[in-house]
């Protein structure tokens, strides 16, 4: 047989001081506690869903920002490539114009060479012997 020793302040099985499973208020307190735990669980479930949604939205927003940066870089690269193509086209135009100018200069050079010199004009416009007299007097 076992010996039961009661400590001071222990009222026994019928004490009713609110301490122990035999207390009639214990069931009510346990019921309220269970209700509160259920509400906490429900609130946590809703918060978990919202948190998951927020994290997904944040991840999507970060991905969207990254894509926007990439699109901006592609656009700037594309515009730089277009600028390079425009400059190349302008260079081709300028080279074509320079080639045309070279051709005209060559034609002018041959025309200038075909023109009579000042001496040729003077000699052809002066009467014969004028230069002969001038050179003999020297």
Image: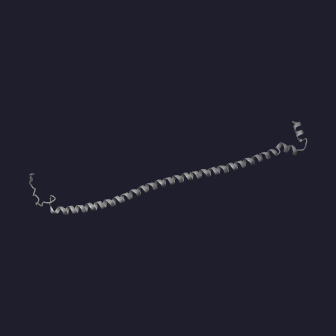
Relative to residue 15, is residue 109 drawn left or right? right
All told, the count of numbered labels is 0
Relative to residue 67, is residue 89 drawn left or right? right
Residue for point 40% across, 57% down: 56
- Foreground of the two, 98 or 71: 71
Residue for point 43% across, 56% down: 60
Residue 42, image x, y percentages: 30, 61
Residue for point 29% across, 60% down: 41
Residue 87, image x, y percentages: 62, 50
Residue 13, image x, y percentages: 11, 59
Q: Residue furthest front?
A: 1
Q: Say which quarter of the image contains residue 62.
A: bottom left
Residue for point 28% across, 60% down: 40
- Coloured how? one colour
Q: Residue furthest right?
A: 128
Relative to residue 109, is residue 95 drawn left or right? left
**Quarter of the picture holding the C terminus:** top right
Residue 98, image x, y percentages: 70, 48
- Foreground of the two, 26 or 127: 26
- Foreground of the two, 47 or 29: 29
């Amino acid at each position: 047989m076992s010996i039961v020793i009661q400590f001071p302040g222990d009222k026994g099985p019928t004490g009713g001081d609110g301490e122990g499973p035999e207390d009639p208020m214990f069931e009510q307190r346990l019921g309220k506690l269970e209700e509160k735990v259920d509400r906490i669980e429900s609130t946590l479930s809703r918060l978990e869903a919202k948190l998951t949604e927020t994290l997904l939205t944040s991840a999507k927003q970060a991905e969207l920002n990254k894509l926007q940066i990439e699109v901006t870089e592609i656009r700037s690269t594309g515009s730089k490539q277009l600028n390079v193509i425009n400059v190349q086209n302008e260079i081709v135009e300028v080279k074509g114009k320079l080639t045309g100018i070279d051709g005209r200069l060559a034609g002018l050079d041959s025309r200038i060479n075909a023109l009579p010199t000042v001496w040729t004009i003077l000699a052809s416009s002066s009467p014969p012997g004028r230069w002969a007299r001038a050179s003999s007097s020297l």
